[in-house]
Every structure is written in structure tokens, then in C-alpha cells.
Amino acid sequence: MRHPQHPSPLPDDAESPSARGRGNLPAELDAFVGRVAELARLEALLGESRLVTLAGGAGIGKTRCATRIAARVEKRYCDGVRIAGLSAVREPALLDHAVAEAVGLTDHTRRPPRTALLEYCAERQLLLVIDGFEHLAEACAGLVRELLLRAPGLTVLAAGRCPLRVEGEHTFTLAPMTDEDAVELFARRTRAVRPGFTLTGADRDTARDLCRRLDGIPLAVELAAGRMRALSMEQVLHRLDDRFRLLTGGGRGALPRHQTLRTAVGWSHELCAPGHRLLWARLSVFAGSFDLEAAEYVCGGRGLPAESVLDVLDDLLAQSVVMREDTGTAGRYRLLDTVREYGAQWLEAAGDTGRMRRRHRDWFLGLATWCELDWFGPRQAEAAARVDRELPNLRRAMEYSMESPEEVRLAQHLAGALWFYWAGCGRLAEGRHWLDHVLEEESGHDTSRLKALWVLGYVAVLQGDPAGAVPALLECREAGELSGDAAAVAYAVHRTGCLALVTDDLPRARRLLGEALDRYQEAGELNSTVLMARVELAMAVAFEGDLDEAARICQEVREICEDHGERWTLAYALYVLAYTALHHGHGGRARRMLRECLTIAHTFHDLLGTVLSLELLALVTAVEGDAAEGAVLQGAAERIWPSVGLPLFGSVHYGRPRTRCAELAREALGGERYEAARSAGRRLAAEDAVARAVGARVPGGRDGGQTPRGAGAGAVGAEADGGETGGGETDAGEDGEGAGPDARRPATSRTTGRGGPEL
């Protein structure tokens, strides 16, 4: 029996259910102090202007104020608040990638990232905080200007040392803290290193004098507070006073604020023990944040044994030289920009910058290599998350390797080792940028260059760019054959076969994918890519009509994935198994597998896996009698495709589920209702569409109502053994309540005589 259709999921004026409260605001690890009047003024300005720049000198507290005010006004923006920290981005060419990453944009296409970013922001009501842009001011101004023109719902709060000088900009210059706020900040930060510390009577006057000497600059005050573990407040004041007198010829004339901060930073540096100074300087090679393991490897040695790094780092934390970040995982650390710049100058003066940058590069080269190995195993999600956290450092490592012709091959190795991140975690556009860049320089046809070539070919295929894929794969194959690199040849053949598959050349696809698998076996290769070749071969076999053989291949892949803890390729194997299950009339089984596909793909930000699963799930939903919901899911997929590439690759075969779903839904709903449901789906953001598909009502379910959101994750494991290949009968109740196949099959579905819809 057919169940009632869903009501339209989103009225025209509805707010997306998961849009509220979205953002990437960092947690505050210590109390925010003061700035009441400034925050009130900023809040008012954000209500009056779409571009507010919070300007001020180094250490004045721009980042904390911007983050604080963003949290206060977050509810004004139905698509939330996003913070783009740019201090670790050195190349203007990476600006658009960094901002796209910050707003949560995943785009697989070969479109310039700015084009994708403009389209993404154009339909959102969003507050974008751009922090630390001064070294990219010109490029950033151009981007902000375009964004504001194209995205009427966008508001930008910029925080930097200078205005952007963009039309419509309202600049708010952040002044030093008031005496009372500065004293409160000093007292709070001192209590972090001296529990129980309080200010009373004359002590408060001394603290006020100290904060005035520091011009009320928050960073300078915090550095001074960090010294209270070893010195009294009077000692801190007198030593700073002596330092200032030296710089003003013995008088007490006021120094410029930038000099005050530099003096405070320099004085803090002077009070450091030699090992502390050394670690401070060496930590300056990191881009953005870092973890303890990296600090021990990169900074240890020559006067600072690796085993002592933790203790020295702990001291620098107490002195407010190093900041701790709360990432929800292992502890991470960061130098504020001013502190990093000071340390970098000392490192350069010591003549040690080149060596430390090499050690930094070597660590992250090793990390990428290790994560590539972990990608084929139970730590797959961990590997993806770690690369995500370390992306600024990985960029810096590639940049460094490109500076020397002798080391270009290491940049190529690094860009190639990250293939799983580019292709599997929604980073195709940035991956294409780096692969094109590292291959501009000749390094000989060694293993590193050949790997970068086939990865470039792979990325280009996924971007729907045969003109970019074919030359790279051809060069890789020819050079691999000349050099005897059997693995490189296998990868080139594989990706050429993949190109044939998505362009509907099925005989060539089967031949090349079969050849690649033979070559992989000869070379002893087994990893996610090799298993993906099997899945792609199964897809070609299925498109040619041998669904049982396709299911057999993917069931083997599924078992191997489960043995190794591999999830990413498993999702694609489940997609093919769902395709064959639906053909055999097992809609319930297909739905459960597709829900797991969606859960996995969304976890890895894999838009291709997400949208393919949505397309097939739309058909399953329509076949099972809920044509309106099928049309909604189809509309949701339509919204995602522009960020993936040519819809369904322009392939007749990949397009069959969409065509069949449209036929069923139109027949059941009529043209007007069908288009209305599709339109509702197109208003769903990708994350909302996935949440809906994974937790939506199950047609034919026992309670006739909603299943909990997330119920699809892991549901495949609950299937009865034996029928996953799609050829056997389902158990009673699997696709319906013990009813026969005819009762489960909606009246709108034409079948092939084997129980499922035509595909």
C-alpha cells in the first residue's frame, strides 16, 4: 500500500533546519576581559554596514574581539558565522582556497575557486570574519569587493593592522584597553601562573602603573603576567621601566605603541633561558598551529634535546609566548603573529632558518606519507582529519621544496602522497592547484613525478576535464614503461579506464580496468585505489547488464574493506550493491546501503559519493511509493552537481536512475507537483539533504512514521547474510511487513520481470 506523500519540506520562506548556529568559531580557552563599549559599538556597526574592518596594531586584541563579537551576533545570520584566519597563508594564489575552506565550501570542479566561492556565498546569509589579512591586503580587498557585490546576504568583519580600503567599508580602530580592563586582564592571567593571586590596595596601584607602561596593549600585559611566576610585580615593573629608559635616552617619554609591544616582547625574550629562546625561534617555522610530536622532531637537537621540548614548551605556555588551542583532540599550540615574527628574526640572525625549514618540510613529508598508508585501514578518518589540521604546514612544506630545483621532486612526492585527501576529502580544486604547480618544474621521470602525474590525471578525470587528464596519464604511462615503474603504469592505465567509464566507452573501460587490475596484482599493489578499480570495473559490468557479476565483484570488495577497516571505497562498493539490489526488487536493502554510503561520503566531504548516492536513493524512494520525497532528493542532488562537475558526467548510464526517477515521480504526481517537490529539494543545503536522506521516514516502515536521524549509519550490518549480491530473495519483512513482492512494488513501477525497475 502506498503511504501518504511528504508535505513540501521547505516553504519558500523557511529557514534550513541545520543552518542555524553553523560556524567554526573557536572555543575560548581563557576568560574574555573588558571591551564592553567596543563590543557594543561593533555590534551596532554590523547592523549598519556590510563591511566593518576592526583595525589596530599588533597585539591589541583584534582577533579576540572579532571572535567575541561574532559569537554575540551569530543568531542574526541564518547560515552562521565563518572565520577565515589568513596569517598562515603566504601566497595570494591560495587566498581563495583558504576562504573557501573556511566557509565550508567543497567544490570538485575545475572552476576557479573564486567563481565557486562567489556562487556559494550568493545564496547565503552569512557573517564572514577575515582575520590577519594585512600581508595579503590588496588581494583580500579584491576578493571582499567581489563577494559583497555578488552576495547580498553576506556581511564581512575584517580584522587586520590596516583598512581594506573597499567601498562601503566602515573602519573601527581598536584602542588599547582602559586602565581598569588592563589591570583585570593582568590579574586574571597572573592567577593562571600563580593561583590565589589577588590585587588589593597598593598592589592595584602598582599593577595600574605597570599596565600604563605597557600602553594597555593586551599581548604586552599577558606577557608581563606570564613573568609573575618567577618575579614579583614590583620586579616586573622596575625591569620594564629600565628597559624603556634605555630606549628613550633615560627619560620617561612615551614610546610609540608598536615600539612598546616590541620592547615587551623583546624583554620577555631576554628573560627566557637559552633553551626557551631557542625553542621560541625554532617554533617560528610552523604555519598556523602544531602539535607536540612535530615540535619535538622539528625543534629538538643542537642545544635542545627532543625529550626536553615538552618542559620548555610548558614554560613558554606559562609565559604567554605560546598559546594552546582546543581542538577536541590532542593538544595543539600556536605562536601569535607578533611573537612568531620576533622568533623568526632571531632564527634568521642565528643562520638556522634554512635547516629548520628543511626539518619542518621533512616532518610533514613523512606525515603525509604515513597518512597515505593509514588511509587504507581503520585509521582512515583519523588520517583525513590530521591532514585537514596540518594543511597550512603541508602547504608551507610544498612551498619550501619548490624554492630549490634539486628538491622539486619532494614537492611532487608530497602533492602525490596527498591524493587521498584531494580526491576523497573534497579538495580537488586545491589538489589541482598544487599538482599543476609542482609539475611545472622538471625533475626527471622519477617515481615522485610519475606519481604526481597519475594523481593529476585522476583529479582531472573527477573534475570532468579529459583535456587535462589524457596528457598527464599518457606521459605517466610512457615514462613508466621506459623506466620500468610497473606501479606507475598500472595507475595510469587504471585512471584512463576510469575516464572511459564516465564517458560511456564501456568496452574500453572494461578492457583498461581489467588490465590495470592484472598489473596491480603483478606489482603487489593493494590499497584503496586498487579496490576502487574493482568497483569501477563492477560499474562497467553492471552498465553492460551483468548485474550479478557486478554484485559479486563488489561483495568481494566489501569483504576486503571490512577486513582492513577501509570505509571510503566501501561506500562506492555499497553504491553498486544498492544499484543491483534495486534492480532485483530489494528496495529496503538498497536504501540501507545507500544510507551508509551517504554517511561515509559526508564524513569525508566526498561530494561525488554523496550526490551519486542521493540520485540512486531518490529512485529507491520513488519506486517504494513516495514519489514526492524522491523528487525532493532529486532536487537536492541537482543543487550539489554544480560543485561536482558535469551532472552525472554527462553519462547515459550514470543518468539512468535520474531518468527513471523523474518518469515515476511525474507519473505519480503530475508535472506541477513534481516540479514543486524538486524545487523544494534544490533549496536544501548538502548537509540538510544528507540528514534528511539518512534519517527520513522509511516507506513501508512498521510505525509508518519517522526513523531517527542517523538511523542509516551502520544499518547494512543488520542485513541477513547471504543476499547482498542482489540475486537472492529477501527475508520476509525486509522490504515490507512480510508481504509478497507484489505488495511491496508500487503501482507506478515498471519492472524487468526480476522484481525491480528498469535501469
Image (cartoon, grey):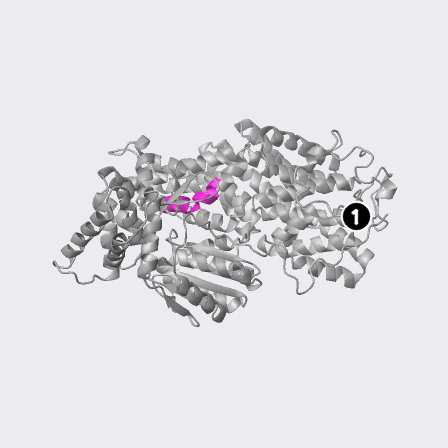
| Residue positioned most to the front | 201
Q: Is residue 104 visible?
A: yes
Question: Residue drawn 80% across and 34% down?
Answer: 730
On the rendered structure, is 215 left or right of 705? left
- Residue 313 coordinates in the image, percent (x, y): 32, 39
| Element on which disc 1 rests | helix
Q: Main secondary structure of the magenta part?
A: helix
Is 395 in the magenta? yes
- Residue 70 coordinates in the image, percent (x, y): 47, 59
Residue 512 against residue 638 in the figure, above or below: above
Residue 608 against residue 515 in the figure, above or below: below
Residue 21 against residue 379 in the figure, above or below: below
Question: Residue drawn 74% across and 29% down?
Answer: 721
Q: Nearer the viewer, residue 592 or 729?
A: 592
Quadrant of the image occupied by residue 603: top right
Is 36 in the magenta? no
Question: Residue drawn 54% across and 68% down?
Answer: 152
Q: Is residue 132 visible?
A: no
| Residue range highlighted in magenta | 386-399
- Residue 216 coordinates in the image, percent (x, y): 29, 59
- Residue 240 coordinates in the image, percent (x, y): 20, 52
Residue that mark 1 sits on: 623
Residue 588 against residue 11 in the figure, above or below: above
Q: Which amino acid does the dot numbered 1 rest on?
A: Val
| Residue positioned most to the left | 250
